[in-house]
Amino acid sequence: MHLLSSLWLLAATAEAHYRFSRIVVNGVAETKEWTAVRQTKNYQSNAGVTDVNSPDMRCFQMRPGTSTATIAAGETLGFIAASSVSHFGPVQFYMAKVPESADINTWEPAGNVWFKAAKIDAVKGAGGYTSGPDTWPAYQKQQVEFQIPKNVPSGKYLVRVESIALHQASNPGGAQIYLSCAQINVTGGGNGTPGPLVAFPGAYKSNDPGLIWSYYPVKTSYTAPGPAVWSG
């Protein structure tokens, strides 16, 4: 009976978590997991990253990439959460340009190579910030998406989706970060210079205000961690 209870608890915990394993390009979803998305270490457990100083903060990957999706600058790229974004918190999207001489399947995005392309942040209500979907637009959604910046230069990129779960983040180290990286080829881009560029690990500290959540007293301000979104 004890073994059955433990197995049930493990299954329930995994079900409450999630992974981003497929992308959607202009409304067309991939039918198989880990196609343009590099397979992550949580492909079975669905667990998040809790150590912001870990190299897992880059792509959380366990295997090199195998495929690259093509999308035009200005078009919409989405990530599908299996089974949904089941914890409240912000969702952010970073991009890193792959050097022309590098193999996109094996390139390691270390150093200051990432810029923030978009974010789905908290929305303040009349009573402040809550832990529900009224504050967090991405919460309980199966798909999150953003527009590839129109002025981003053409080329191959890693696109990093990041959902920061704050439900246990009352103390530093309690935030759970669910992330993965998609491999894309951007066409029809512009001549912008994306920035500021940051590194993972390095962009976040465990005590960043955006990684800490207080149920009481009710928060009156919230800003997701990391740099500002590149304005293009």
Image (cartoon, rainbow, N blue to C red):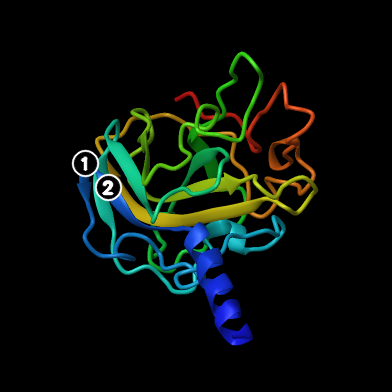
Residue that extends furthest to the top in the rendered view of this protein: 126
Q: Which mark is residue 24?
A: 2
Quadrant of the rendering where the C terminus is positioned? top left
Secondary structure type for disc 1:
loop
Judging by the rendered image, the residue that carries numbered circle 1 is 27
Secondary structure type for disc 2:
strand
Residue drawn 21% across the image and 60% down it = 31
Residue drawn 31% across the image and 60% down it = 36
Residue 57 image-quadrant placement: bottom right
Q: Where is residue 22 drawn, in percent x and y?
A: 32, 57
Does residue 170 appear left or right of residue 165 in this picture?
Answer: right
In front here: 228 or 174?
174
Residue 151 image-quadrant placement: top left
Q: Are marks 2 and 1 in contact (CB under 8 Å)?
A: yes
In front here: 124 or 209?
124
Amino acid type at mark 1: Gly
Q: Where is residue 144 drawn, in percent x and y?
A: 39, 41
Assess disc 2: are there few (<14), some (14-19) or many (≥20) residues with their C-alpha within 10 Å of its C-alpha: some
**Does residue 105 lie above or below 125 as drawn?**
below
Residue drawn 48% across the image and 63% down it = 15
In front here: 157 or 163?
163
Q: CA distance from mark 2 to mark 1?
A: 6 Å
Q: Where is residue 214 drawn, in percent x and y?
A: 75, 36
